[in-house]
Amino acid sequence: MELKKISSEIRRLTALELGEKIKRREIGCAEAVKDYLEAIKTEDRAFHAYITVMEEEAYRQAEEIQKRIDRGESLSPLAGVPVAVKDNICTKDARTTAGSKMLADFVPPYDATVVEKLRQAGTVIIGKANLDEFAMGGSTETSYYGITRNPWDTERVPGGSSGGSAAAVAAGLAAFALGSDTGGSIRQPCAFCNLTGIKPTYGSVSRYGLMAYASSLDQIGTIGKNVRDCAAALSVISGYDDKDSTSVMQTPFDFSGSFPGDAAVSGRRLTGLKIGLPQNYFDGGISNDVKSAVLEAAKTFQALGADVEEFELPASEYAVPAYYIIACAEASSNLSRYDGVKYGYRSEQAKDLTEIFFRSRSEGFGKEVKRRIMLGSFVLSSGYFDAYYKKALQVRGLIKAGYDKALQKYDMILSPVTPTTAYPVGSQIEDPLTMYMADVYTVSVNLSGLPAVALPCGFGRAGMPVGMQLIGTAFSEALLAGAADVYQQHSDSSSWFREDAGHHPADRAEAEIPNGKGGRGK
Amino acid sequence: MKITDELIDYISELSRLELSAGEREGAKKDLTDILNYMDKLNELDTDGAFELIHPFEDTNRFRNEGCVNGDRREAMLRNAPASKGDYFKVFKTVE
């Protein structure tokens, strides 16, 4: 299997390029939306990126936005651009399931703040993307609505939990997408599907209308063909929201300084930029595919003028256990709202109120969700609270302190996103511990509330994409995106969607792999 | 940490989950494996260490107390599995 060339010129454009053409009225909104919706109809059968396609509403929106453009209204650079929204983000009057049987008939009476912002910016929501049930998983195999497949190889998982969002963008079935990242759920599918994604600083994007998994870790972010698309979308959805008490950023992100015009690009370097490379991330469980691609990328950063230095990131091997204790604890509390009374699934077997709770939850939740609720209930229970939950919070403090110290010395940290490339469907789903341990490079970022940009950096031996991430101090998104952009302008790793790019990773010479600059000819 | 029959009963009660015999055995094994792995945290000495509950703890925001949303009763009831008039409907809970 190999990634099929995206079948239309419109869908091969980046989100910003499409937005520009719509603004200049070279492409009509409805034309762009139709191109995407028709492609979903014929092509999504192979991937199952979407749970719900919002055809009627998308056309209606497109018409409305076209009128606004024709009137000369000043809209965002993404006006008219089709976007996929992860199905744990509420869309008014459009079914939002969180990938669960529990919410199979749930139609939100309100829009999430990010959805409201997408609408104000004139983007067109074309559908709700598949995900692991309640965002709990790393492969989009736990969705009640069926698995999503990786467009680079449909025998493999797209990653998760934002696997539908990533598959949609990788297959050219959405120009960009929103995902959510609690422990890597944006970055890991981006790594598996050769995409760029931004997990923003905790508190920079409103969580109002995001179905809560672990509230101190959850953050909505963006997935796109390149970092410029992700940044443009992030400046739309970020900023203060009084409906989210953890919203801390007064104004949306401003990336205007991150991406100078094309003329300035070729000469752009990263002189003076200090990048830390956690050497302990490259021992042990990491595959050669990922290790060599990320180390190669480190060399590229160095060649671009950055000062790359190895260092030891302390306590990193404790991040996964601490994360799963904290995330499950918060999940067990958050998911207690699904009681079969106010909304969601109610068992028909129930004969009294207690049975409504027990039966509805037992029949409505899937296996992984139940496992995490039980783990969370256990670590919070009296007698075990101190040994597990309190201990994990202390370890969380140590992990954050480790990052804080490193980021005093370095402008950013370069790290792998995953220990391996995308694995075959069904190969790990019965082994929860192995799946949890694969989150080793992503969860500590959430525990610390920090931003990270995940971006492609080459291919492994099976022709599958490898991702890396740049991690920075809180609210350093503009700096991270700028550095990611310089890398992307100097490598072919983010031009896979171009018509003249080689779409046949397996055909490329072994010697060129896994260098991000190899074989994707312009 | 071994999850015994007694503990799994306690956990499923706390979780408001009813487990089938198969689910129960699977959960006992999975939870035992996972908790054994989590016991790795005991290698770290955290005596007196700060408990980080939230990434940015000093940012709690307060707002004036007051009603800001209108009457959305009908919209809210639309998703209820059962309702009667203006209310959610459940089984009689008081004899």
Image (tube, helix red, strand yellow):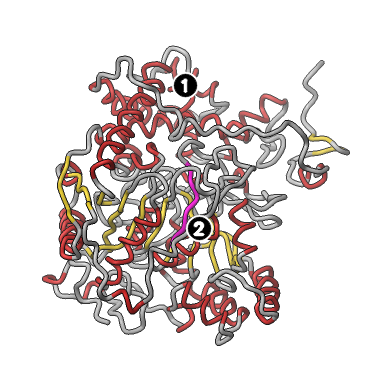
* Image quarter of the N terminus of chain A: bottom left
Query: Earlier along the polypeptide chain: callout 2 or callout 1?
Result: 2
Q: Residues within 10 Å of mark 1 (few under 14, many from 20)?
A: many
- Given residues B53 and B80, the one toward you in this image is B53
Residue lying at 49% horizontally and 24% vertically, measured from the top left: A377
Most extreme residue toward the top is A383
Residue identifier under label 2: A178
Q: Which residue is mark 1?
A: A380
Q: Is residue A415 above or below residue A372?
A: below
- The subunit letter for the residue under badge 2 reads A
Find residue A312 and report its horizontal and vertical position in percent.
Answer: 17, 39
**Residue placed at 70% from the left, 51% from the top?**
A110
Give the percent coordinates (x, y) of residue A234. 49, 58
**Would you place residue A351 above or below residue A265 in this image?**
above
Q: Locate residue B63 relative to residue A461 in the image: left or right.
A: right
Q: Position of residue A254 (x, y in %)?
A: 47, 59
What is the magenta segment's predominant secondary structure? Answer: strand
Query: Residue at 23% of width from left, 43% of height from top?
Result: A409
Q: Magenta stretch: give its range.
A: A218-223
Is A297 placed left or right of A141 in the picture? left
Taking the image as shown, residue A200 lies to the left or right of residue A57, namely left
Front position in the image: A167 or B69: B69
Q: Secondary structure at mark 1?
A: helix
